[in-house]
Amino acid sequence: MKIAMLTSGGDCQGLNATMRGVAKTLYNELGDVTIYGILDGYKGLIEGNYKKLKKEDFSGILTLGGTILGTSRQPFKKMRVIEENGVDKVKAMKETYKKLDLDCLVILGGNGTHKTANLLSEEGLNIVTLPKTIDNDLWGTDVTFGFHSAIDVATDVIDKIHTTATSHGRIFVIEIMGHKAGWLTLYSGIAGGADIILIPEIPYDINKIKDEIEKRTADNKGFSIIAVAEGAISVEESKMSKKEFKAARENMKQSSIAYRVADEIMEITNHEVRVAVPGHVQRGGAPNPYDRVLCTRFGSFAAELIKDKKYGNMVGLKNGVTVAVPLSEVAGKLKNVPADDQAVVAARRVGISFGD
Ligand code: F6P
């Protein structure tokens, strides 16, 4: 059997652990398997840039952050656009697949990656995918790998800010990644004991944030921690068309949501506000134990799908069980935080404000 693997889109913790899970299962159960690594995501597939991997390449990488194959962002909407130099990207990807005489291409990626994976599957290639992203916004799985490791990092940031915010009696706004979904902010916000959590799914009203801060001050709590998702929007913004929203954001003084919220709070209160933006730290370093186990389960399940020729599927986790989810169902759908998510409900019950 011949397979190739590629990692695409933003990296996260657990990419190597997942590839190890696929490879070790195939080596152990089939013995005779050839594995190629496609370098730098779809770019390598287009350009025919790959290397033959050996069994040893998958040793010692369970805890290694990043990806041993490299990654890149190749926007789906440009996949069918012919390049100025005449390169037909879809044709080129199919040619690399054929040249390597593959039985299956294993793709690790998030939302954008899955749209292209589905395209390749529709073009007749045998594809199996794995759900990667710290954003946890992939449809068809309860959890993506990388998410729980990123929660650890973001929670650690909030914990550390907590001590200095308490000492100084300051308001801190901490910006958490997550693209257009609030999962990472919701979970790290709850875990870090944030007082206010702002997520894209629940538009915020700055006056409600002010009320919450004043209430805490009246209760002799001189500091407040606000965890804001990078994709959070205000109530006014939620009513705008896409075009209006884009224009409004382009005209803003601050490009970062955390600084904008901080400015707004300083304008309407007398409080001193500081901002912390951990950024890509959230995607870096080793996967945590939860992810190491999840990646091993995902990877070995992917290997079973390959052995059984169950192509055209993403590996997911549903109610604690690994499942195969058809790529056609996954592609193009986002998994956002439902307003009645149990974590949101519990957070509200313990007094966390969502600024609404
Ligand atoms: O999808 C993962 C993610 O880290 C998002 O949370 C964030 O919006 C985005 O990638 C950042 O992208 P880049 O690494 O291209 O700056």
Image: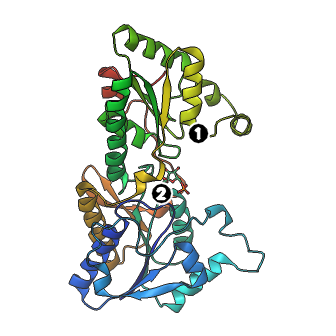
Q: Is mark 1 within 8 Å of ligand 1?
A: no
Q: Give the residue displayed 34% in from the left and 25% down from the top.
A: 167
- Which residue is drawn at the image coordinates 64% and 36% (left, top)? 254
| Kind of residue at disc 1 | Ser
| Vertical comparison of 278 with 144: above or below | above
- Image height of 164 relative to 125, above or below: above
Q: Is residue 259 above or below residue 107?
A: above
Q: Name the residue: 47% across, 13% down.
A: 211
Residue 19 visible in the current orientation: yes
- Secondary element at image label 2: helix
Residue at the image position 36 percent from the left and 41 percent from the top = 157
Residue pushed farthest front? 168
SS class, disc 1:
loop
The image shows residue 275 at horizontal and vertical percentages of 49, 34
Residue 79 lies, in percent from the top left, at 65, 69
Dot 1 corresponds to which residue?
A: 256
Q: Position of residue 139 (x, y in %)?
A: 44, 51
Label for residue 29? Answer: none
Q: Tell me: residue 58, above or below residue 211.
A: below
In the image, is the residue at mark 2 within 8 Å of ligand 1 by its beta carbon? no
Q: Which mark, by number, is residue 329? A: 2
Q: Nearer the viewer, residue 246 or 117?
A: 246
Q: Residues within 10 Å of mark 1 (few under 14, many from 20)?
A: some
**Is residue 8 toward the left or the right of residue 294 in the image?**
right
Front-lying residue, 315 or 20: 20
The CA distance from mark 2 to mark 1 is 33 Å
> Residue 249: horizontal and vertical position, in percent?
68, 37
